[in-house]
Image: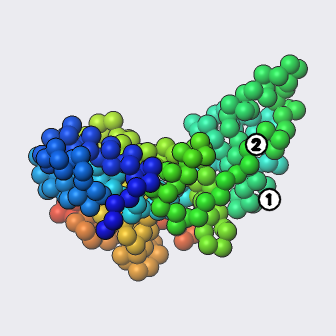
């Protein structure tokens, strides 16, 4: 393997070296100074085999290397879960939607959520509302919206990070090979692959995940497998499916009915809710636990 010499590769490798030093890995100073991507990957492998090392340090190091291996489709927010604005809604409804949203940027669609015509930044909306004599009923949301940036779902995270930095952008709409909208990806999504987004390793702070008093986990079907693995220190495979619902469908080879249960990878998966052909909620518990009725 040849060394990567692009700006993102240099930044990533420099950060890896720093994390290896801070996290107690013991490659020599010469190795740290001269190592290429392959050498650093070997150091990471040794670090991961040391189970006494801090899990968050291991996750950060793994996330850096996986920038090349992962695609934006692995971390994007799927179109079924993304919040968007209808350009045909009354202006006051649009203003309320933006101001009540936890996100600073939201896609703008017309006629269909598949037809993204812009991206609304909350700051641009606030500027428009701050104009003299401005009223929410008179806001032209299409005029305020920025031009959408479309990126292929097969783009590697490393290339997308480089593109975000080059364009000084934070938000892109993800499309498949046919140009159909698949979801959205943000700069924060990629950075979280490196630094993680869990404040405490004992707390579950993922949207759509709730720990029950009996120790089971109730999960929305759209939750990414990678997020669960990172938060709970699980090792569910994500090569064939991105979401937890997708994993259950892939393993069961069918669209399960509500209350159906399956056991694989050391976990018991119980379908709590299904809408049409989508699994929207699951309960997960260790396979060795005594099965309990789904609620």
Q: In percent of the image, x 67 and y 53: which residue is there?
A: 149
Name the mark nearer the viewer: 2 or 1: 2
Q: Can you tell which quarter of the image residue 133 is in?
A: top right
* 112 left or right of 189 in image: right
* 169 left or right of 267 in image: right
Rounded to the nearest whole Å, what is the CA distance between mark 2 and mark 1?
16 Å
Q: In percent of the image, x 40 and y 52: which residue is there?
A: 9
The tag earlier along the polypeptide, 2 or 1, is: 1
Residue 119 in picture, x, y percent from top left: 70, 46
Is residue 250 shown above or below 82? below
Residue 215 in picture, x, y percent from top left: 25, 49
Residue 32 in picture, x, y percent from top left: 21, 47
Residue in front for this viewpoint, 184 or 206:
184
Q: In percent of the image, x 29 and y 53: which residue is there?
A: 62
Residue at numbered disc 1: 111
* 138 left or right of 225 in image: right
Residue at numbered disc 2: 145
């Amino acid at each position: 393997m040849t060394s990567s010499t692009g700006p993102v590769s240099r930044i990533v490798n420099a950060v890896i070296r720093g994390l290896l030093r801070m996290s107690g890995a013991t490659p020599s100073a010469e190795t740290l100074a001269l190592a290429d991507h392959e050498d650093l990957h070997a150091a990471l492998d040794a670090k991961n085999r040391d189970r006494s090392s801090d899990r968050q340090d291991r996750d950060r190091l793994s996330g850096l290397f996986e920038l090349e291996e992962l695609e934006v489709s692995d971390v994007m927010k799927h179109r079924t879960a993304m919040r968007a604005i209808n350009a045909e809604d009354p202006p006051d409804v649009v203003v309320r939607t933006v101001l009540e949203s936890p996100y600073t940027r939201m896609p703008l669609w017309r006629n269909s959520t598949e037809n993204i015509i812009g991206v609304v930044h909350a700051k641009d909306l606030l500027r428009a509302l701050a104009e003299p004599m401005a009223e929410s009923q008179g806001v032209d949301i299409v005029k305020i919206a920025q031009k959408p940036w479309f990126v292929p779902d097969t783009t590697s995270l490393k290339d997308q990070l480089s593109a975000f930095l080059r364009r000084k952008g934070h938000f892109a709409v993800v499309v498949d090979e046919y140009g159909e909208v698949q979801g959205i990806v943000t700069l924060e999504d990629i950075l979280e692959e490196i630094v993680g987004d869990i404040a405490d390793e004992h707390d579950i702070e993922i949207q759509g995940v709730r720990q029950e008093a009996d120790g089971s986990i109730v999960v929305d079907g759209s939750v990414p497998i990678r997020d669960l693995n990172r938060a709970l220190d699980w090792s569910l495979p994500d090569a064939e499916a991105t979401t937890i619902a997708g994993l259950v469908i892939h393993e069961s080879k069918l669209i399960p009915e509500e209350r159906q249960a399956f056991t694989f990878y050391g976990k018991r998966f119980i379908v709590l809710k299904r809408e049409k052909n989508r699994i929207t909620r699951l309960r997960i518990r260790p396979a060795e636990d005594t099965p309990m009725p789904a609620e």
